[in-house]
Amino acid sequence: MSLTETEIKESIIDTYTKVASNGRLVAERFYSPEELQGLPTSAVELALGVGNPARHAALQRGEVVLDLGSGAGIDTLQTARKVGPTGKAIGLDMTPEMIRRARANANAMGMTKVEIIDGPMEAIPLPDASVDVVISNGVINLTMRKSQVFREIHRVLKLGGRFCVADMLVNGELPEDVLNHPTAWTG
């Protein structure tokens, strides 16, 4: 029996809600001490990505940046620092507890140019051509509809916009029992 997209999303939300409750530290693998300095403990402890796309996105002051699957906000907060007070960082996530924590982390840092929004990456709740840069850290692998995510990224990017991703890839086909196991979809 194959898992449905709804079952996969429910499993992802359940898993990341549990992670938000317990926390685990992976940030020091991908972020320098300088990048972590001044960030709320919650953002650092709940970093669940597989890289540091904000470091490689060549962000400029004044840009509007969307962070797909922002979690507790580590990349969104990094981005906000880089684009400065004339820019804006938008975090998008679908897990209510991560959204709550990301908002609290942005508030704790006094960041007024950070917006955390609720929604799926397959249907980004932003207007066409509204962002300069899209970053993503370890989340596109979690969707069954990757092509739709890339269409959405293209839709929200301004002409000449950029996309910087850190993620996992599989080279080849996965066995059916792996594809139909909920934990295979939750990172």
Image (cartoon, helix red, strand yellow):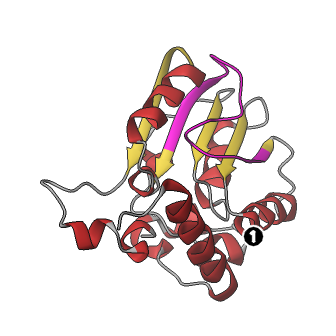
Please state the horizontal and vertical placement of residue 58, each as a whole percent of the image. Answer: 46, 34
Magenta highlight on residue 54:
no
Q: Which residue is depicted at the point 25% across and 54% down?
A: 169
Residue farthest toward the bottom in the current orientation of the protein = 22
Residue farthest toward the front in the current orientation of the protein = 1
Q: Which residue is depicted at the point 69% across and 46% down?
A: 119
For numbered disc 1, what is the local secondary structure? helix
The correct choice, above or below, for 39 with respect to 118 in the image is below
Magenta residue span: 115-135
Magenta highlight on residue 130:
yes
The residue that label 1 is drawn on is 97
Please state the horizontal and vertical placement of residue 152, each as a whole percent of the image. Answer: 53, 29
Depth check: 132 or 70 in front?
70
Please state the horizontal and vertical placement of residue 141, each as a whole percent of the image. Answer: 38, 54
Q: Residues within 10 Å of mark 1 (few under 14, many from 20)?
A: many
Residue farthest toward the top in the current orientation of the protein = 159
Please state the horizontal and vertical placement of residue 133, each as a whole percent of the image. Answer: 54, 30
Q: What is the quadrant of residue 66 in the picture?
A: top right
